[in-house]
Amino acid sequence: MSGYVIEGATGPWELVIGLEVHAQVVSKAKLFSGASAEYGAEPNSQVSFVDAAFPGMLPVINGECVAQAVRTGLGLNAEINLVSRFDRKNYFYADLPAGYQISQFAHPIVGKGVIEIELEGGAIRPIGVTRLHLEQDAGKSMHDQHPALSFIDLNRAGVALMEIVSEPDMRTPEEAGAYLRKLRTIMRYLGTCDGNMEEGSMRADVNVSVRRAGEPFRTRCEIKNVNSVRFVMQAIEAEARRQVEIWEAGGEVQQETRLYDPGRGETRSMRSKEDAHDYRYFPDPDLLPLVIEQAWVDELAAGLPELPDAKKARFMSQYGLPAYDAGVLVMEQATADFYEAVARGRDGKIAANWMLGDFFAGLNRMGRGIADSPVSAERLGGLLDLLADATINGRIAKEVMEAMMETGEEAAAIVEARGLRQVTDTGAIDGAVDQVLAANPDKLAEYKGGKDKLFGFFVGQVMKAMGGKGNPALVNEALKRKL
Amino acid sequence: MASASAALDPAAVRRIARLARIRLADEDVAQLQTELGAILGWIEQLNEVDVSGVDPLASVGSATLAFREDAVTDGDQTEAVLANAPARSGPFYTVPKVVE
Amino acid sequence: MTLEFTLSGARDALRARRISSRELTEAHLATIAELEPELHAFITVTPEQALAQADAADAAIGRGEGGPLAGLPVAIKDLFCTKGVKTTAASRILEPFVPPYESTVTANMLRDGAVFLGKTNLDEFAMGSSTTTSAFGPTINPWQRRGSNTQLVPGGSSGGSAAAVAAGMALASTGTDTGGSIRQPASFCGIVGMKPTYGRCSRWGVVAFASSLDQPGPFARTVEDAAILLGSMAGHDPKDSTSVNRPVPDYAAACRRGVKGLRIGIPREYRADGTPAEIEALWNQGIAWLRDAGAEIVDVSLPHTKYGLATYYIVAPAEASSNLARYDGVRFGLRVPANDLTDLYEETRAAGFGAEVRRRILIGTYVLSAGYYDAYYLKAQKVRALILRDFTDAFERVDALLTPTAPSAAFGLGEKSDDPVQMYLNDVFTVPASMAGVPGISVPAGLDTDGLPLGLQVLGRHFDEETVFAVGAALEAAAGFSARPGIRMEAGR
């Protein structure tokens, strides 16, 4: 299928990859308490007695978190389960105040869905989603603040998480990366998770196993809490190689939980799991079954924004864009909106080319993004208008774009101020052509002698002589006449 | 139903105590084997009950979960949350260092 | 002097200014001071707070603003978190704990003007039926066998609250009932105790034992008093997802309804082998009383009754094992210092939990553990569904059920402690109603040959506490129970 294999001494090995993503739900308050779910507050300042599991405290569910889970499920084209249930997952850890996490084990709120990923070369693959459920996040323990103590901050304890489990459908690190990026894009469109892996609002646990082609699945290992797409891809490769080595040496891969060490480029076993956890799941008796109405789900569906796949398809048909370009433009909703503002009433392909080319390049150079772009969509559109009515040519437009980024001024003003209008006066053009031909007799001779490629050289020289302002079509035509 | 007269061996008692994070002295283990075994043996009588076609009780009433509004109504009480802590450092709870 | 008052009578006297709350409270504090060394019904007495509350109540009554419980001295089971007042659940692991919040039930009572005398003793974490598992020593039943001064248990887990009311240390008190922990001590102490429908009273701020069973409820010396107190305790609480949103009716008025035309079911499975003849006889007497009062007596069957205990002793410990995981020495309560986290947990919990709590946590952990969940917990929840169905089927044909409350009168302090299973059998008549969530009351109905009180239990439909109170009141009227316990303040003090 993908053809990606790891070559072992005894032959090629396929990868089998599954991803479990923990996505923090965008909401004001936590899943079962009224404390704030915002990131970055002073330690233990966003903690309800419920979050801290004080005696007698009880959970009450935040309806918006349920809505966000449903929206995400809809965005994954998944089954929404109108009846679901919360279970307790029991284990002891310093950042888990109650000694159990409220999660959904047997009856999750969202069932099977699918995410379509795009790969290099434009291929599209569907990756299955097994389920999505709601659960509480744990607090944070810091082990590096003191030689003998770990410090516990419960601000994050109780924040709503969506756990999204994929089918083991991925076969290459690239597919895993594409899946994560697409999932992040979908959730950002929906406003259900901001997908910020560095801040920890989206975390991935990676399940990796290897096998010979056609075999059933072999033992897998889980690599926990990988916090960037790049590291996910690296970790998969490192872990797959480790497993191949073991199998090739005649050993057996042990099912275990591991961590990825980016410094060393390898995974290592988590020592704390000496005995396998027995989570003793049972229905949380402080909560009743979660029952939602189809009418409410339909209302939520009606309120969803246009999602990336649909937007991409529309960009292709409405603006005539190729798949790749459309795909890049829809990766962030803000980018797509910006594009449409630029493309409105203009040539969509030209708008896309300029955005994807010089505009993005300029932003990258300045370390900016769409959100803090010094050039607004309106202004970029203004530049394209000047091109479209031949006030300026393409080369000048690049210059103007750079100036717009630096100064924040609009295109027309810059063109006027710097006298950059395109020269269409054929007399001036002829004059420049004659000048260039006269200045380059040897090149002219080579051209006449059959070196056709030199035409581009002459174009460049004429443009240079004209300060870049010559109308390219007229320059071409004049050169053709005189050569 | 699992037979509890394949009662509890010492390893099982220790495993459960570990899951429950309660330290057992060696002399406790034998006594607990007996006591827990007796309780589990007594519970075995549920084997007699025919539960085919019966759903486990989800809740005593017929109610379903009521939603809370998404509003910040709690927190911002660092001192109250830490006041009962047996060990703290500034705004943090502290525990013996965990090595991961 | 305090035993002369009922809650209702004291309320009238306060409103008529025949007595002040301060006087009433001082009298109760004096009774406590006198009897505590012998009875040990309290873990914490709060005299200063009580007197301050009494003074505030007197002022409110003076302005004509007193609430339904204004100025009435009551006792609170030390399982309810009371803000600023130590709350221990009778456990070493919570001995240092001072809650920064007030439970909803006690907040309701304070809203209505109650005066809190202190926190009463209980079995540790409400696990027990004798109050002998308290980490702070047992409570002694103010009743004694005729001609004997053997110390008897008050029942449990709410033994302190029951003893306090029986001995006149409080006009009324709160308890919690998970498998019988209000009804059985009420029976052992010759007073009224009521477990409302599951979800009637809020569990927010009540230290959790078994979440799907726990229910706060009132103790008092009369049925009407219990109804008055429940009226304040009950009500919807949005902070408790299992709390039911139904209005609170006038329970005191329901006590006066009578039983004419009501159908009373007598479940044949409650006639167990080995039930003492006296209890059988009292039950038959109760049947006769209700018939004479105009009720129709109907034979009914609750076929799964005998499985109630086994089901309870799977479900309750399972939930408890999870609910008690939070007692880990990190954020509150006892901590035994250690060098690593696992040791911290294990040493703290070993030192902090008593033997019965440890047993139940271990049983609970076991029945939920891998490989056993289906066989034990899942099966128990299915049998529980059958027990509930027994009740709903019976309530198609009758309006209430009459049964004995306990299979014995109060027993001696050391008598049943060796075999946990023997202790569990105390709950045989009370547990099925807990599993089904239906309301139940125990009313003192007579004395056994040793002169010890015996109670009769009335069970009703979900949220039909009114019928339960009506039948209870009818029994109370017919029984004319007026015996007093031997350990009490002498007359004239």
Image (cartoon, rainbow, N blue to C red):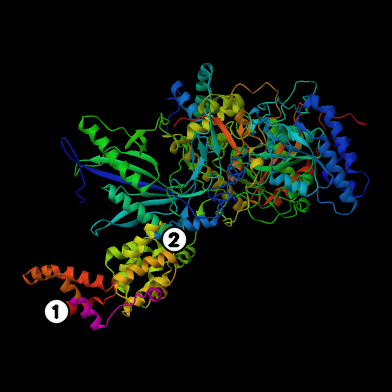
Say whether disc 2 or disc 1 marks the residue closer to the N-terminus.
Answer: 2
Q: Chain of mark 1?
A: A
Asked if both marks, 2 and 1, belong to the same chain, the answer given is: yes
Number of numbered discs: 2
**Amino acid identity at mark 2:** Leu
Q: Which residue is mark 2?
A: A190
**Residue stretch in magenta:** A415-434
Residue at horizontal 37%, vertical 58%? A364
Q: Position of residue A171 (x, y in %)?
A: 26, 48
Magenta run includes residue A423: yes
Left or right: where A415 falls relative to C218: left
Q: Position of residue A112 (x, y in %)?
A: 36, 54
Res C74 seen here: yes
* Mark 2 neighbour density, 10 Å: few (under 14) some (14–19) many (20 or more): many
Q: Quadrant of the C terminus of chain A?
A: bottom left
Q: Which residue is mark 1?
A: A482
Q: Position of residue A401 (x, y in %)?
A: 36, 68
